[in-house]
């Protein structure tokens, strides 16, 4: 038991000793670490001080550099400002000098103006005195002239004005003639060139048409078949076509008569088909006529489209195209209207191109200018007004409408393309062989020319020559002077333009002859 206690005590002592030793060792270790930490902290603190000193020196250097830079910039800016101020001062000095000179000039001009005003006042005063003197002299002269001439001032003034008016008329006519001659000399060649180009480009065939069509028969026996039993076939044909069939003594031929060329074309084609087929009876006639009508309608449509395509015109309304196609079957003075329309369109395009105008407007107006001739007969008005109305209705441009409406001078011209259309229309109608007039209208035109010319004072004789293309007027030499002859020719030409309708142009020639006659006794 004692041994156990001793061991326990020893163990306790050893434990205490171990604790004390451990504590001492731990304390030593901690003190050692503390010492190291203090050493490290001192070193770090020293290094931080060194680094702070370095940074401080660097900051001081940078501050000094910035201060030096700012000082340099300030000096440069100050120097620049000084230079600008010096320049501004120099400019200001120059402006002051200029102002001084201007002030001196102004003062000098004011002095001159004052002098002029004074001089002008003196002159006005002198002029007033002279005016008074002139008025007195004029009164004295007038009284003396009235006493010498035996006329009052009003009578003298009237005679003077009459003489001046007569002299002015003579001078104006002489001036007009000179200007006209100069214009003709310069413009004639150019006009001929343009017209020659236009005509050369548009030359084509001409086909003469009338109000009758002739259908050849294979034999005389066919006439009987066309007439039919008790005339049933011919009556059915006339009823279906609206065309009169003339069966006379003409060998192997019948004549189709009617004023509607489309109906006449339908009748001719239908009759030729019936003759070729050989089956001629009322039912067959109606069948063939209806078929031909449809084909003609289709041909009218295609003809209008083909005409526009060949002329290089697009965007035309289908109804207008149909009216253009109908012109194929229309004539005017025996001139085919479609051929005439094509000629006018090509001529208008060429002339417009030569003059630098709108070619498209001129050609569209040329294509549509006579569609009123192919319109329905129930439309009222002239073919010109109907054509313009239709063009406006179907959306054509105002220039095109005006050109169409003015191509016979029915309305005022608002564009040069209208003048071009007038020229082209006249060229197509006036070329030799284009149109054939009736004898009655020809005689009336000649009588109208002579009537208009004889209505003027001083005209002794009038002769219409060159198929009505020229009228020669002989005047009394004692009543009409040379200068008045030019005025008379112009007045007669203007009257002819206003009162007569004719293709092309009419030349008016006034002849004044002076004869001296004496008899030897």
Image (cartoon, rainbow, N blue to C red):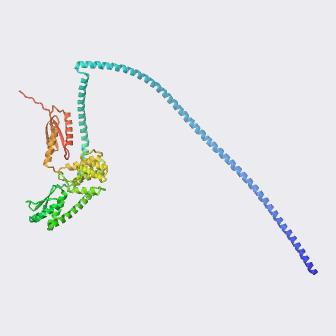
Residue 213 x, y percent position in the rendering: 14, 58
Q: Quadrant of residue 38?
A: bottom right
| 514, above or below 294, in the image | above
Give the residue at the far left of this rendering: 521
Answer left or right for 67 relative to 258.
right
Residue 212 x, y percent position in the rendering: 14, 57
- The residue depicted at 91 percent of the width and 76 percent of the height is 9
Q: Quadrant of the C terminus?
A: top left
Residue 14 x, y percent position in the rendering: 89, 74
- The residue depicted at 30 percent of the width and 54 percent of the height is 394
- The residue depicted at 64 percent of the width and 42 percent of the height is 75
Residue 275 x, y percent position in the rendering: 14, 65
Answer left or right for 107 relative to 498.
right
| 160, above or below 196, in the image | above
Q: How many marks?
A: 0
Q: Quadrant of the N terminus?
A: bottom right
Closer-to-camera residue (493/94): 493
| 513, above or below 31, in the image | above
Q: Quadrant of residue 130?
A: top left
Can the viewer see residue 239?
A: yes
Give the residue at the far bottom of this rendering: 1
């Amino acid at each position: 038991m004692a041994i156990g206690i001793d061991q326990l005590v020893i163990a306790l002592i050893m434990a205490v000793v171990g604790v004390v030793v451990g504590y001492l060792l731990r304390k030593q270790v901690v003190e050692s670490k503390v010492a190291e930490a203090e050493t490290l902290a001192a070193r770090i603190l020293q290094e931080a001080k060194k680094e702070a000193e370095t940074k401080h020196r660097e900051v001081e250097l940078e501050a000094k550099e910035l201060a030096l830079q700012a000082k340099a910039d300030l000096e440069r800016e100050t120097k620049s400002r000084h230079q600008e101020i010096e320049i501004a001062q120099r400019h200001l000095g120059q402006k002051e000098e200029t102002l001084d000179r201007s002030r001196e000039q102004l003062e000098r001009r004011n002095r001159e103006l004052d002098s002029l005003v004074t001089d002008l006042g003196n002159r006005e005063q002198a002029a007033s005195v002279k005016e008074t003197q002139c008025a007195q002299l004029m009164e004295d002269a007038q009284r003396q002239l009235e006493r010498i001439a035996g006329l009052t001032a009003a009578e003298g003034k009237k005679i003077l004005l009459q003489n001046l008016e007569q002299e002015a008329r003579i001078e104006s006519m002489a001036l007009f003639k000179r200007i006209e001659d100069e214009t003709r000399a310069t413009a004639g060649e150019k006009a001929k060139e343009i017209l020659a180009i236009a005509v050369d480009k548009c030359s084509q065939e001409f086909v003469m048409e009338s109000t009758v069509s002739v259908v050849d028969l294979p034999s005389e026996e066919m006439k009987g078949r066309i007439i039919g039993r008790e005339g049933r076939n011919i009556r059915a044909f006339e009823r279906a076509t609206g065309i009169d069939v003339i069966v006379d003594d003409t060998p192997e031929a019948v004549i189709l008569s009617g004023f509607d060329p489309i109906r006449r074309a339908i009748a001719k084609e239908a009759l030729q088909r019936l003759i070729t087929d050989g089956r001629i009876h009322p039912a067959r006639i109606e069948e063939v006529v209806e078929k031909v009508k449809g084909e003609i309608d289709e041909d009218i449509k295609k003809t209008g489209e083909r005409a526009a395509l060949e002329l290089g015109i697009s965007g035309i309304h289908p109804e207008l195209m149909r009216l253009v196609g109908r012109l194929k079957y229309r004539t005017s003075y025996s001139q085919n209207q479609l051929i005439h329309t094509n000629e006018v369109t090509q001529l208008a395009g060429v002339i417009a191109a030569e003059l630098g105008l709108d070619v498209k407007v001129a050609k569209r107006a040329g294509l549509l200018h006579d569609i009123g001739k192919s319109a329905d007969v129930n439309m009222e008005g002239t073919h010109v007004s109907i054509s313009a109305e239709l063009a406006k209705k179907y959306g054509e441009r105002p220039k095109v409408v005006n050109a169409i409406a003015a191509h016979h001078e029915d309305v005022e011209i608002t564009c040069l393309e209208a003048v071009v259309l007038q020229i082209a229309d006249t060229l197509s109608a006036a070329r030799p062989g284009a149109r054939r007039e009736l004898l009655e209208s020809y005689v009336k035109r000649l009588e109208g020319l002579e009537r208009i010319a004889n209505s003027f004072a001083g005209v002794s004789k009038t002769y219409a020559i060159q198929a009505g293309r020229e009228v020669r007027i002989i005047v009394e030499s004692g009543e009409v002077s040379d200068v008045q002859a030019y005025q008379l020719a112009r007045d007669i030409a203007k009257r002819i333009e206003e009162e007569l309708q004719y293709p092309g142009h009419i030349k008016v020639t006034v002849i004044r002859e002076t004869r001296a006659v004496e008899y030897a006794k």
